[in-house]
Amino acid sequence: MASKNIPMREALRNALREEMLRDERVFVMGEEVGEWQGTHRVTQGLLAEFGHKRVKDTPISEMAIAGLAVGAAMAGLRPVAEMMTINFAFLALDAIVNHAAKIHYMFDGQFKVPLVIRAASGWGNQATATHSHTPEPIFAHFPGMWVAAPSTPGDAYGMLKASIRSENPVLFSESIALYSRPGPVVTDDPDYVLPIGKGDIKREGKHVTLVSYARGVEWSMQAAAELAKEGIEAEVVDLRWLRPLDIDLVLESFKKTNRCVVVEESLPMYSFGSEIAAQIQDKAFDYMDAPVKRVSAMDLPLPFAKEIELMALPNAQKVIDAVKEVLR
Amino acid sequence: MARLTKETLLDWYRQMVMIRQFETRCADLYEEKKITGVYMHLYSGHEATGVGALAALGVEDHVITAYRDHGLALSRGVHPNPIMAEMMGKKTGVSGGKGGSMHIASRQHNMWGGYAIVGGHLPLAAGIAFASQYNDRKEVTISFIGDGASNNGYFHEALNISGVWKLPVVWIIENNLVAMGTRIEDSTAQTELHYRAIGYGMKDGGRVDGQDIFAVYDKVSEAVEYARAGNGPVLIESMTYRYKGHGVSDKSYDKRLADELAEWRENKDPIELLRRELQKKFKNIDAELSKIDAACAVAVDEATEFALNSPDPGYEDLIRNVYVEE
């Protein structure tokens, strides 16, 4: 399979473009996706290629963006709706949680809601408290939709295609910090579709399992590289999807290493890390050699000042410290 | 009005009587604890608005509404049996007993459902209409809106985007003067709700007497044709009145508004108004009307029996359709 090193935003754009070429029902909508070319440049060029019918600039109306996408999906289209940032998705929480995720069940299968809500997520640019959320676990809390959060351009490409082709609603989180990171992306297979709910071992190891997704994988990989210098071999499990959760992959790794650190971009209370820790103790208690540790953001709103903003956030060093604790 | 045949008018009468009898039976069954749960919002009093509006649509068109939805489903042609079964949470219900009173939908009738979050269905209506526009199909979506929903954000966002994109939607506010328990004067600064159309750049369809099925039919027909021709959405305000409380939890409605309620029931009852019109138009119609009344009573009895004798959903139903299998 041929591949090319491109940034994640370009990988996402390729996936969008190819799916629009493949399926007439696919259209993109959102704030500034057209004339502006996308605030994160993911939708760049799509308006010129596909025109106003299929690239819809919307008013600043998150409830309408998500809700209209739900109705259009029910009526047979394949909307890919963009939330400029995932923070704004809070305004559309009812449309996403009560409508996108519930309609198939509530009407006992009469309607399908095959939509994708893409949302840029993350912090670290002094965006301050309201613009720095990574709330993927909030969406993953609710049954009825899938939640995707890729860590590499190649995964982003195959996962977005899978999401667009899915018959179920998908919240597709894109880490702002990763948009510019390059990585190999398949160039000669428009049907390169990664399976929904399958995680990936990004690095093999035998001493400790690092479980993460999206940007957390980057710190995990950095930490693993450092730890290797000291002879500690960390296995990095990239779950890719918060729902469905590939807990089997986690357990398989954990049964080998008997120790686990969960690395999450988001907040620690009622979190991704809490879920992984709970499932490990429930399903692999006899394999535990140490408590499961979590590396998360600090439990506070993020400030503006760079120095203290970074203090509050996870990084590779914090992962290394946590690994040393579970290996003690 | 010349285009309306006797057959059509009798069918309107049948639909309205059917709704009234069905809703009255639902209230009785709730008292008898045969229908359970905390939510059931009856349509009695609104019949002319629902039936008159839907008479303006073809089978290819679309209907969506809030939780006061049973009457509209009946008018749309959904069989009373699965509706009643849904009311009782039975496996044979339109939504398999999983949606209940507030989620009556039938995909085959383009009845896209009742929705329980106030205003939540408004962008869905815009989305359904967008799909018609996208596929270049000349269909129209009617979205009913309670007067209360006109004050939340969904209303603003959905109506605005429908105006910007010229979506083929007819928005019909069923203004029954009370949002749950709050009078419109206490909740809404501009109580003529159809004026909102101006702010969204759409056609202001004005107010209509929602108890007069002829007026509703004419007004909505005009709006449907306007939307179907690609001119964009229309907002209509239909003045109506609810005979029962907001829902089954509303115990004091009859007492709070006793005089007003009596006035509407006695002088503005939509079924009575149509009956009088029919009596004026056609000689010796009473026997035919009585026959329709009796046939509706039989249909409601049958629906009740059907629902009572239907099985409850089981574990397999509980876990089915969380996701589309893929």
Image: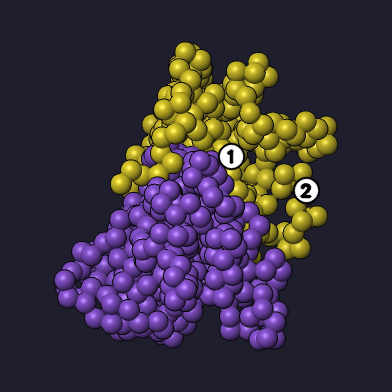
Could you say whether the residue bearing mark 1 is in a helix, strand or loop? loop
Residue B34 falls in image quadrant: top right
Q: Where residue B11 sits in the image (x, y, percent)?
A: 43, 31
Residue B182, disc:
2
Residue type pointed to by label 2: Thr
Q: Chain A appears in which tint?
A: purple
The location of residue A285, given as percent across then percent down, is 53, 42
Q: Which residue is mark 1?
A: B68
Q: What chain does mark 1 sit on? A: B
Q: Is residue B300 above or below residue A312?
A: above
Between B315 and B105, the residue placed more toward the observer is B315
Q: Which chain did the image draw in yellow?
A: B
**Pointer 1: residues within 10 angstroms few (<14), some, or many (20+)?**
many
- Judging depth in this view, the residue of B212 and A232 nearest the camera is A232
Location of residue B80 with respect to A292 vertically, above or below: above
Classify mark 2: helix, strand or loop.
strand
Is residue B175 shown above or below B46? below
Counting from the top left corner in percent of width and height, residue A4 is at 24, 81
Quarter of the image for residue B59 reads top left
Residue A111's tag is none
Seen at 51% across and 35% down, the residue is: B99
Instruction: Tell me, yes or no, if residue A91 can be seen here.
Output: no
Please report contact status of discs 2 and 1: CB closer than 8 Å, yes or no.
Answer: no
Q: Amino acid at mark 1?
A: Arg
The residue at the point 37 percent across, 77 percent down is A8
Indicate the position of residue A280 as horizontal and vertical percent values.
51, 47
* Discs 2, 1: same chain: yes
Q: Earlier in the sequence, mark 2 or mark 1?
A: 1
| B24 lies above or below A233 | above
Residue at the spot 70% in from the left edge and 38% down from the top edge: B246
- Point 78% across, 48% down: residue: B182
**Can the viewer see residue B30?**
yes
